[in-house]
Image (spheres, helix red, strand yellow):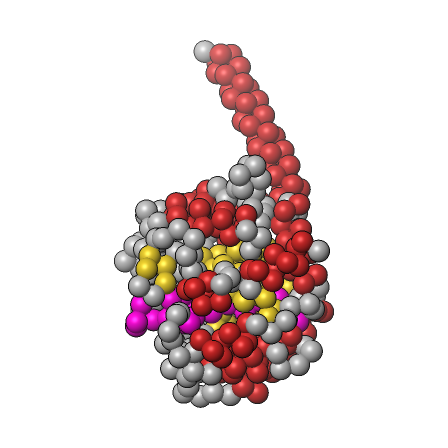
Amino acid sequence: MFKTNKIQSRRIIKSITTCVLIGTMLISQAQSKNNMKDAAALKLDAFLKEIAPKGTMFGHQDDMAYGMGWRGLYDESDVKRVTGSYPAVFGWDLGKIGTPANIDDVPFDSIRSYIIRADELGGINTISWHAFLPDEKTTPWTVDKEVVKHILPGGKDHSVFIHQLDLIADFLKSLKDKKGNQIPYIFRPWHEMDGKWFWWGEGHCTHEEYKQLYRFTIDYLRKVKGVTSMLVGYSPDRNFYTAEEYYTYYPGDEYVDLLGIDNYWDLGTEERNLDKAIMKLEIVVNEAKKKNKIAAMTETGLMLIPEADWFTTLDKVVSANETTKQISYVLVWRNFDQTQFFAPYPGHASVPAFLNWVNKPDIWLLKDLQEYRKK
Ligand code: BMA
């Protein structure tokens, strides 16, 4: 009896040791492989840095998915209707991952197809995540309860977070071109954290918790799930005035490839201050240069574009000087309906100024990017 138990327990210990060894090997193999970005991601990184001094790409959220008075049509785009070309950068959002359609009712299968198409056409994809965690009732704007603390390792909702990250990873890994190669893209999680409107934002978690959230997200996607075709964007809103403040929530150089800013406010109607907008963009560009990272105005826009010349205003910011001109792209938010749109559509009063702006040689739509790629 004793002997059998001893043999059995030796066997058990041996198999546990083997499992642990194999596990450790697999993890370290995965880490050494995935700490690095794959060739596609590195190529995108290099490309974005290469074109930054040459032109600023124009981007639009959900551009192919819907626009004013249409939804789900093939080969459509409000930007294309107005300019004859798609934008160069395409923004998408993974909010509500795990359900058939995203936060803005675009089916995830369609988002995948749009991303593949945008890539095939030579465009650049950027992906944000308006996360619903820990349950569908907790929208990104649910700020009356603590979320971050509970989804971090050791928290009561950690397993739900892991499940969501698994779904995000599955989606990201499914982004393959016709040849089966992974499509590279910019992933921009936990954005506008210096605002108070999202549960991951200022006042709803400590800065340290925020950094943990960010690092955990990227480590889990890269090291555990093998998501390697992603560049990662850091996008505070406009609530900083110095480089030091810009880095308040910064998770670390090894996590971030792109330094961004979401700035609607300084270009808005309530407290417009273009000097501030320019100064902040300069901080972003200068810091990105120091760190050899990409810089971008990751979101902006004037809701409903009530000023016909607003794109001239935007031009004054992005083309203010040789520094601001170094951003790789500027993206305006989505054209949902008459209650929410940020890009012109045919017949809108902002079309002439928009055309003047995007027709400048250093503002690039998809056609300009395609032309550059041919050279
Ligand atoms: C916000 C608004 C919302 C939308 C969300 C995610 O800025 O546009 O209507 O659901 O982004 O795209």
Q: Position of residue 350 (x, y in %)?
A: 43, 78
Q: Position of residue 225 (x, y in %)?
A: 52, 42
Residue at image coords 59%, 66% = 364
Residue at image coords 55%, 28% = 19
Is residue 218 positioned above or below 50 on the image?
above
Q: Position of residue 27 (x, y in %)?
A: 59, 38
Is residue 342 located in the magenta-colored stretch of the structure?
Answer: yes
Judge from the rendering whether residue 25 lies leftward or rightward of residue 266; answer left or right.
right
Is residue 215 located in the magenta-colored stretch of the structure?
Answer: no
Q: Residue furthest left?
A: 137
Would you identify the image quadrant in which residue 205 lies?
bottom left
Judge from the rendering whether residue 103 lies leftward or rightward of residue 277; answer left or right.
left
Residue at image coords 57%, 83% = 316
Magenta span main SS: loop
User: How many numbered discs, if any?
Assistant: 0
- State which region is magenta: 326-344
**Residue 355 visible in the displayed image:** yes
Quarter occupied by the C terminus: bottom right
| The one of 115 and 220 positioned closer to us in this rendering | 115
**Residue 204 visible in the displayed image:** no
Residue at image coords 68%, 77% = 323
Quarter occupied by the N terminus: top left
| The one of 310 and 47 positioned closer to us in this rendering | 310
Would you identify the image quadrant in which residue 321 lies?
bottom right
